[in-house]
Amino acid sequence: MSRAAGCVGFIYPDHAAESDYPRAARLLGVDLPVVHVYGTDLHAAPELMDLGSPAKLAGGVALLAPRRPAAVVWACTSGSFVFGPEGAARQVDRLAAVAGVPASSTSFAFVHALAALGCRRVAVAASYPHDIAELFADFIGAHGIDVAAMGDAGIPTAAEVGRLTPAQIRDLARRNDTPHADALLIPDTAMHTIAQVDGLERLLGKPVLTANAVTVWEGLRIAGIARRTTGLGALFEDNR
């Protein structure tokens, strides 16, 4: 049976901001099914490693199988970068082998999106506790990205991040930006950001890469699906 030409599948941890994906699907005119894997939603390394384990991701692939996606993305930043650059790469390789299609994760989505935009120096506005935020900075730093500034909100669980208001997200972005950065990164897929990307870019006057937006972009990229739209920020406006 052939793969669905316009379908990209996402494996999402627990429940928080998964409503960002159908919103993006409507803007882009593509099928973006989301399935869920479950664990403790604590932003702590042992729990995140369990969440991103091969068994959990294989379970997600099985749930996506009836949709026959052309590509699969692990829609979790912390559950990928927590393994480090090499471990996160092995995670993606195993995911692709199990799914039988191209695969990636949100952590690599940030790296590839920054390359597409030509951005080398960034600010990071993380919702995570400080030690987890530092692991994200280390991950992107290992891929040649200079972190000019980083701040964290110290929020311990994904559920709490999912309850942040648009005003709180704008404040997080504003407080942690720097004029020395080419782009601002907001790395948590538990945060509702799809509807805010354009407003954040207008506020800061630069590209703002949010976890759910770059995850969708990465899925389309590895599936070979070209889409250009307004409403999702500079990354989507130039059909990169």
Image (cartoon, rainbow, N blue to C red):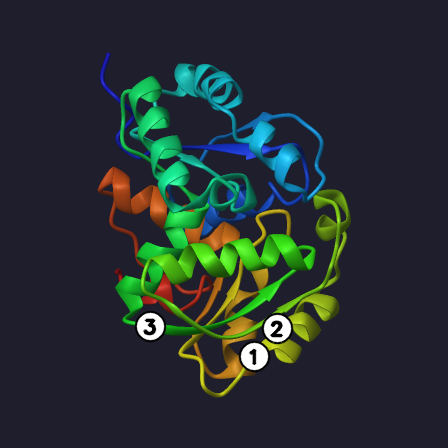
Name the foreground residue: 192 vs 157.
157
The reply to whether the C-beta atoms of the residues labelled 2 and 1 are less than 8 Å apart is yes
| Callout 1 crowding tier (Cα within 10 Å): few <14, some 14–19, many ≥20 | many
Question: Can you say whether 170 is above or below 55 in the image?
Answer: below
Question: At 36% across and 58% down in the image, what residue appears?
Answer: 142
Q: Residue furthest top?
A: 1
Give the quadrant of residue 30. top left
Q: Which residue is mark 3?
A: 119
| Amino acid at circle 1 | Asp
Residue 209, visible in the rendered structure = yes
Q: Which amino acid does the dot numbered 3 rest on?
A: Cys
Name the quarter where the C terminus is drawn. bottom left
The residue at 43%/67% (across/down) is 233
* Residue 61 in picture, x, y percent from top left: 43, 20
Q: Compared with residue 184, is residue 226 higher up or lower down, i.e. above or below? A: above
Image coords of residue 79 (percent x, y): 54, 39
SS category of the residue bearing label 2: helix
